[in-house]
Amino acid sequence: MVTIRPRSRLYVNKIEAFQSFPFIIQRIINMQAAPILEIVGLHKSYDNNVVLRGIDLRVRPGQLVCVIGPSGSGKSTMLRCCNRLEEPTAGQIVVDGIQIMHPRVNLNEVRQRIGMVFQQFNLYPHLSALGNVMLALKKVQRHSQAEAEMRARKALQQVGLEHKADSYPGQLSGGQQQRVGIARAIALEPKVMLFDEPTSALDPELVGSVLQVMRALREAGMTMLVVTHEMAFARAVADRVVFMDGGSIVEEGPPEQIFGAPLHERTRAFVSRFAGHLSHAAAAA
Amino acid sequence: MQQFIFTFFNADIAARYWPDIVRSMGVTIMLSLAVVAAGLLLGLALAIVRAAQKRALVLLVVMFADIMRALPPLIIIIVLFFAFPYIDLAMSAFTATWLALTLVLAAYAEESIWAGIQSLPRGQSEAARSTGLSWWQSMLWVVLPQAMRLAVPPLTNRVISITKNTALGSVVALSEILNTAQAASSNAGSPTPLMLGAAAYLLIFIPVVLFARWLESRWRWKR
């Protein structure tokens, strides 16, 4: 069934309306549910340079967890270990019940369950937006051309870019490229989404559209682990905020705690540096 | 002036030898096509092997490419044609020239394609792998299509220069254009057949150059 709809940003409201009751129930159930992503004792070092010194983290279904911290604190490395783009030195990672550090794990199979969005978008410049989204649908999930195209268009619609299906990455703005990047990941229907500073490479006026898509995704029940510098976003949307520094998790808790009454001195120092920026951005949001 | 035309563009001599020249054009064209097809394919295969980053294989590929690029193609042809019969690997003049030029083109093509692969941002293959594509799939569908486009300008130049090197086949008596024209020149005692040969080269290579230019302008992705 195809309905012609105006190319507005209304879809966000639609999803919000759609969300309401059943999803709230779902979220309450999920609070008790087993974690969909579990990191235990994760260590990572390059030669003599220790980047991660024992990370433990759980993300439950439907949760949005934001990871904040100074640059060089190991946030991105931790995220990239979750689908083994980065090879952990030690530790266990369980995604959707699968031990991804198991020597015989089928990584290509597992990676379909873990969507990833990159700081630099990393769209394929030789393929259209639709082609970018369709590639793994066809080559990994082995859908037919028609089925892959249908799923890809649906994913593009979810990020509000169905009208840009035939555009090439070079013809899209940074914000649009990043939304195509999100569509490429969600088209595979992952169980958890990893965002590696998704808005850091964007011009300030384009950040909003990407954050809006991420909000909508969360409202639709997606589990998300987001490394970000967008403190206002983290404060407003996250279920939990994790503060990392020097390769360890210093403090984690609900946003009210991390931003309002941090327990740890280092958290306080980091968050206070953003305080001015935060109130400004919050006003804008 | 008349003397010049009589010597270099003698109609009688031209009439006598042009069928030979046309026949030799066939040899040159066949040889060029065979060299380009085999050389580019082998170069692509070597670049892929190198990208797989298995240390021993990388070393072999690099050694091959460096040696083949360092040696004058003429020496390779001579070695293949005159020395290989002693190890029971005799080959025809055509095969020797084809093989030598193929190996040289493969070495250059490998370097160009490898340079294209390397100049892509790491994020390209990371994005591909993160969606579950295997190493080979990400190579085939994401990395190579982009690397090949980057490699087109250096490759077209190399293809043109290596196909002109088919003239080197004359040292092993391959009856390609240059050899045929030279032989005819000494028979006729006139440089006119050499002029015919020059015309034959232009006839073959001007379209190739134009095609290369078209390819370079066409193979940029849309912006």
Image (cartoon, coloured by chain):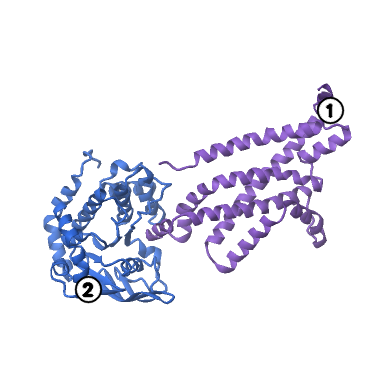
Chain colours: A blue, B purple
**Mark 2 = which residue?**
A266
Q: Which mark is residue A158?
A: none
Q: Position of residue A78 (x, y in %)?
A: 32, 69
Residue found at x 51% / y 38%: B217
Write down the chain letter for disc 2.
A
Res A128 quadrant in image:
top left
Between B77 and B213, the residue placed more toward the observer is: B213
Res B21 quadrant in image:
top right
Question: Where is A113 relative to B11, above or below?
Answer: below
The amino acid pointed to by label 1 is Thr
Res B173 quadrant in image:
top right
Between A173 and A179, the residue placed more toward the observer is: A173
Report the quarter where the N terminus of chain B lies. Answer: top right
Residue found at x 81% / y 32%: B193
**Mark 1 = which residue?**
B7
Circle 2 packing at 10 Å, graded few (<14), some (14-19), many (20+), is some
Between B198 and A168, the residue placed more toward the observer is: B198
Q: Position of residue A266 (x, y in %)?
A: 22, 73
